[in-house]
Amino acid sequence: MSLEDRCRALVAALGLEGELRSVTPLSGGVASDIVMLDLGGRRICAKFALGKLKVAEDWHAPVHRNRAEYAWLRFAGSVAPGAVPHLYGWHDNGFAMAYLDGDDTALWKSTLLAGHPPGGEAAAVGDVLGRIHAASTAAGFDPAPFTNRDDFHALRLEPYLLFTAQRHPDLTAPLTALADALHERDTALIHGDVSPKNILFRGSDPVLLDAECATMGDPCFDVAFCLNHLVLKAFHLPALRADLFTAVGAFWRAYSTRCLWEEAAVLEARVCALLPALMLARVDGKSPVEYLSAITCDSVRQIARPLIAGPEATLPATIARLSSALKEGPPP
């Protein structure tokens, strides 16, 4: 079935009003086909999971993950209304949601890479994420739609940590230990891809997208995953480096006030252990970031590797170590 035929089938199955006049592919992400549908002047967004991801390496993942993503969006919307798009329905590994645009809507990644100094965005994301994690640890939460840790392994642990370990054999032990611990822990409902490329801002309010890695897991993953992108942009944008490192602290302060299911300091230590591993994974894993130069990638490697072998226990100490290494330059 062609993509257009899948869109027509989705529109019909969900009983959406309007004639499907056009299907326009949207950029962003490597794991799904994402399109904008024109239904007679009304625009909506449709998303279909891909079995083979759009990266250079051979990377496959089950398409039924789309259903867990839809369930995450529904739950997150019940906890933080407005923090996810309006949903129209799910059918046959595809779903429809509101198409968000307008002068007050901007992709967080785009504003950062354009050189705009971060303001309160990181704190806003940390607060929303903490609220969602906390709600999923409360009595009465149903984890059944998210008992899919093997999907998370295929989408995150193997392509990021275990694949990277193959390229850095001397770090196999700590990287494998991190992957094993993440695979075993099911403390909270995690998004799995909290990245500026998946966060729109409508004014000062974040809207989270692309939760196809959603599972019951370790909340430290979401925190470290998002902070990693701020750190990598600090490597890429020296003029914003101090602001981006400050944003890391703002994110954690906002998030940690919501961390009631365990001691925040214990979770913070796990974040600090995972963060440099994700830094290395985004240059030597299956899905490297596209904006870092070869020289900057090498700098990330040289600075991340000793932090993987000997992580700090707090984020201020981790950021201080990163800042110092960047000022001195990576070791020869």
Image (cartoon, grey):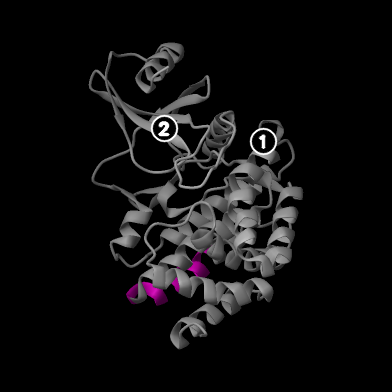
The answer to whether one can see residue 261 in this image is no
Name the residue rendered at 63%, 42% in the picture: 154
Magenta-tinted stretch: 239-251
Residues at marks 1 and 2, CA–CA distance in whole angstroms: 22 Å
Q: Nearer the viewer, mark 1 or mark 2?
A: 2
The answer to whether residue 222 is left or right of residue 229 is right
**In the image, is residue 148 part of the stretch drawn in magenta?**
no
| Residue 47 picture location, percent across and down | 43, 30
Q: Residue furthest bottom?
A: 328
**Quarter of the figure with residue 146:** top right
Name the residue rendered at 43%, 47% in the picture: 198
| Residue 153 picture location, percent across and down | 66, 45
Q: Which mark is drawn over residue 146?
A: 1
Pointer 2: what residue?
33
Of residue 222 and residue 166, the one placed in the foreground of this image is 166
| Residue 50 picture location, percent across and down | 49, 32
Q: Secondary structure at mark 2?
A: strand
Q: Is residue 210 above or below residue 258?
A: above
User: Amino acid type of disc 2?
Assistant: Asp
Name the residue rendered at 46%, 39% in the picture: 84
The answer to whether residue 74 is left or right of residue 34 is right
| Residue 12 picture location, percent across and down | 41, 11
Marks 1 and 2: CB-CB under 8 Å? no
The overriding secondary structure of the stretch rendered in magenta is: helix
Quadrant that contains the N terminus: top left
Name the residue rendered at 58%, 68% in the picture: 276
**Quarter of the figure with residue 144:** top right
Give the crowd class for mark 1: few <14, some 14-19, many >=20 residues within 10 Å: many
Count of numbered tags:
2
